[in-house]
Image (cartoon, rainbow, N blue to C red):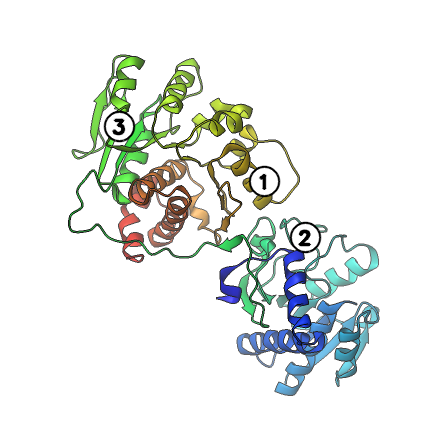
C-alpha cells in the first residue's frame, strides 16, 4: 500500500519530501518519479486518447510537464496549456524538457482527455476569475478527466472545496494519500483513486482503515470468555433488537437485552431480562460477566431515558453510547465521559456529533480527535467518510462505505458489531476499527437496497474474510 497506509497532511507531506531531499534525492528526481508514475497510470487506463494537460505554476504543474512528455514518448497525442510561467526550479526544468505543443491558456481547446495539474497539495486559496473559467471550459469539453494529486480547488487536510469542483474519473495521489482523498465532500468526486510511490515512507497518526485480522475463538473459549454484550432497550424496541442481533453475528459469545416490560426476544438465543425499576436493573448490570453495555439505540430522549443513561454511566462496566444516548448527554458529554475510568466508545453521526461537541470549521479528523481527547472515549464519527479516533490522537479513516447504508437501522447494527468486537478484544480502538470495517464489508456483500436485517445476515461472510 502507498506509504504503508499512512495518510499525510499537507504539512506532513512537505516534511516527508524535505526528508528525501535532505537525504540526497533531488526535487527534479521526485518530480520525475511522480510524473512518470502518473503517466503510466493514465496510459494503462486510457492509451492513445488525445490529451490536454493543464499545468499550474508550481510543482504540480511541473509534474504535468513530465506527464505530458512521458505520454508523448509512449505515442499519445498530447498538448500542454499553462496558466503561467513556472515559479520553481524543478518545474522550469520539467518545462524545458517538454518537446510537444505548448498553448496559451486562452488558446487551448478541449481534448478528449483532460489532466488537471493546476494545483495540488497545500492549496489555501480558491481558483477564481478567468483562470477558473478556462479551467471549467477545458474540463467541460473533455470526455475523461484525471486529477493529479488532488483536483484543483480542494483543501488538502479537510476535503472542503475552495471553489466549485466537478467529478473526476481518476485521481492519482503522489507520494502518499492525503486526508482529502477520503474526507467528504472531496472524496465523492475523486473517481477511481490510485497512488504513485515516489519513495516517501513517513509515519502519521492518521492511517487508512484496513481489513483486520480477527482470531477465531480458542479451543477453551466459552460464551463468557467470548464476551457478554448487554443491550439496554428503550422506547423503540426494534432498534435494540437490531443491535443485539448484530452483536450476536459479530462474534459475541452471549447477548442479553434488558427491558422494562413487554419485550419479546428477536430470537430464541438472545435472552431478555426484564426489570421492575432502576434498582433492579442496577443489580442486574452488576453481573461481573458483562463485557460491555450498549445504550442509545431506540432509547428515547425523555427523563426516563436520561435516568437509564445515568445508571449505565454509573456502572462499573465498559459502555458503548449511540444515537439517543448522545443527544441526551448533549454538550456535557466530554466532561461526563472523562470522569469514567473504564472504556467508553461513542458512535455519533454528524448530527449527534454536533450535539455533543463544539462547532468547528476544522477537519473532520481534527474534530474527532478533539472529542476523543476531551472525553477520554474512542470516537467513531460516522458518515460516508467515517473517522475513528482514540484519546491518544491515533486516527483511522475508512474508505467510502456503500451508499446503500444510508437507511434507518444500520447505525444500530454498527453499534452491536463494535460492542461484540470489544467483548472479544477488550480494546476499544481495535474494536471500533474492526466493527467499522466489517460493517462496510457486509454492506458491500449485501448488494443494493438492503434492510438492516439483510445487512446483519451478511456479517458472518465479512467476518470470514478476516480469519
Tag nearer the camera, 3 or 1:
1
Question: Which tag, 3 or 1, sits closer to the chain's start?
Answer: 3
- Left or right: where 2 falls relative to 62: left
* Residue under pointer 3: 257
Q: Quadrant of residue 114?
A: bottom right
| First reached walking from the N terminus: tag 2 or tag 3 | 2
The residue wearing badge 2 is 155
Spatial distance from mark 3 to mark 1, Cα to Cα? 33 Å
Q: Are marks 2 and 3 in contact (CB under 8 Å)?
A: no
| SS of the residue under disc 3 | strand
Contact, mark 2 vs mark 1 (Cβ under 8 Å): no
How far apart marks 2 and 3 lie (CA) works out to: 45 Å
Q: Residues within 10 Å of mark 1 (few under 14, many from 20)?
A: many
Please determine whether, in this image, residue 97 is positioned above or below residue 330. Answer: below
Q: Nearer the viewer, residue 275 or 342?
A: 342
Residue labelled with disc 1: 367
List x then y, in percent, for residue 438: 36, 50
218 relative to 200, above or below: above
Q: Is residue 227 left or right of residue 6?
A: left
Residue 26 position within the rendered picture, expressed as x and y whole percent measured from the top left = 70, 76
- Which residue is at 57% across, 46% downward? 365
Amino acid at each position: 500500500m502507498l506509504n504503508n497506509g499512512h495518510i499525510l497532511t499537507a504539512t506532513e507531506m512537505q516534511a516527508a519530501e524535505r526528508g528525501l531531499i535532505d537525504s540526497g534525492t533531488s526535487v527534479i528526481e521526485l518530480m520525475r518519479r511522480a510524473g512518470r508514475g502518473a503517466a503510466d497510470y493514465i496510459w494503462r487506463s486510457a492509451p492513445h486518447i488525445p490529451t490536454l494537460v493543464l499545468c499550474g505554476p508550481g510543482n504540480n504543474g511541473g509534474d504535468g510537464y513530465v506527464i505530458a512528455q512521458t505520454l508523448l514518448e509512449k505515442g499519445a497525442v498530447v498538448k500542454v496549456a499553462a496558466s503561467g510561467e513556472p515559479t520553481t526550479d524543478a518545474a522550469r526544468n520539467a518545462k524545458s524538457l517538454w518537446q510537444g505543443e505548448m498553448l496559451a491558456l486562452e488558446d487551448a481547446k478541449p481534448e478528449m482527455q483532460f489532466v488537471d495539474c493546476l494545483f495540488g497539495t497545500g492549496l489555501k486559496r480558491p481558483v477564481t476569475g478567468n483562470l477558473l473559467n478556462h479551467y471549467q471550459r477545458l474540463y467541460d469539453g473533455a470526455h475523461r478527466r484525471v486529477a493529479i494529486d488532488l483536483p484543483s480547488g480542494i483543501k488538502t487536510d479537510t476535503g472542503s472545496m475552495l471553489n466549485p469542483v466537478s467529478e473526476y474519473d481518476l485521481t492519482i495521489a503522489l507520494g502518499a494519500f492525503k486526508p482529502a482523498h477520503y474526507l467528504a465532500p472531496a472524496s465523492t468526486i475523486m473517481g477511481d483513486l490510485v497512488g504513485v510511490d515516489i519513495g516517501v515512507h513517513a509515519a502519521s497518526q492518521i492511517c487508512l482503515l484496513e481489513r483486520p485480522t480477527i482470531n477465531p475463538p480458542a479451543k477453551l473459549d466459552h460464551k463468557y470468555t467470548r464476551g457478554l454484550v448487554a443491550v439496554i432497550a428503550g422506547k423503540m424496541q426494534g432498534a435494540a433488537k437490531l443491535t443485539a442481533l448484530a452483536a450476536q453475528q459479530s462474534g459475541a459469545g452471549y447477548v442479553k437485552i434488558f427491558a422494562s416490560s413487554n419485550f419479546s426476544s428477536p430470537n430464541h438465543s438472545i435472552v431478555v431480562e426484564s426489570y421492575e425499576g432502576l434498582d433492579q436493573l442496577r443489580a442486574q448490570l452488576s453481573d461481573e460477566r458483562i463485557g460491555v453495555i450498549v445504550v442509545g439505540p431506540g432509547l428515547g430522549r425523555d427523563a426516563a431515558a436520561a435516568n437509564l443513561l445515568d445508571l449505565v454511566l454509573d456502572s462499573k462496566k465498559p459502555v458503548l453510547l449511540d444515537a439517543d444516548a448522545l443527544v441526551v448527554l448533549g454538550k456535557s458529554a466530554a466532561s461526563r465521559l472523562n470522569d469514567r475510568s473504564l472504556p467508553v466508545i461513542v458512535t455519533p453521526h454528524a448530527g449527534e456529533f454536533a450535539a455533543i461537541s463544539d462547532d468547528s470549521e476544522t477537519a473532520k479528523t481534527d474534530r474527532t480527535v478533539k472529542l476523543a481527547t476531551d472525553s477520554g472515549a474512542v470516537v467513531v464519527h460516522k458518515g460516508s467518510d467515517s473517522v475513528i479516533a482514540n484519546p491518544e490522537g491515533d486516527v483511522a479513516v475508512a474508505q467510502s462505505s456503500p451508499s446503500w447504508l444510508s437507511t434507518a437501522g444500520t447505525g444500530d447494527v454498527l453499534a452491536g458489531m463494535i460492542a461484540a468486537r470489544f467483548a472479544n478484544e477488550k480494546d476499544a480502538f481495535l474494536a471500533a476499527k474492526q466493527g467499522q470495517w466489517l460493517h462496510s464489508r457486509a454492506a458491500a456483500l449485501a448488494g443494493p437496497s438492503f434492510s438492516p436485517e439483510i445487512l446483519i445476515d451478511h456479517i458472518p461472510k465479512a467476518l470470514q474474510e478476516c480469519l
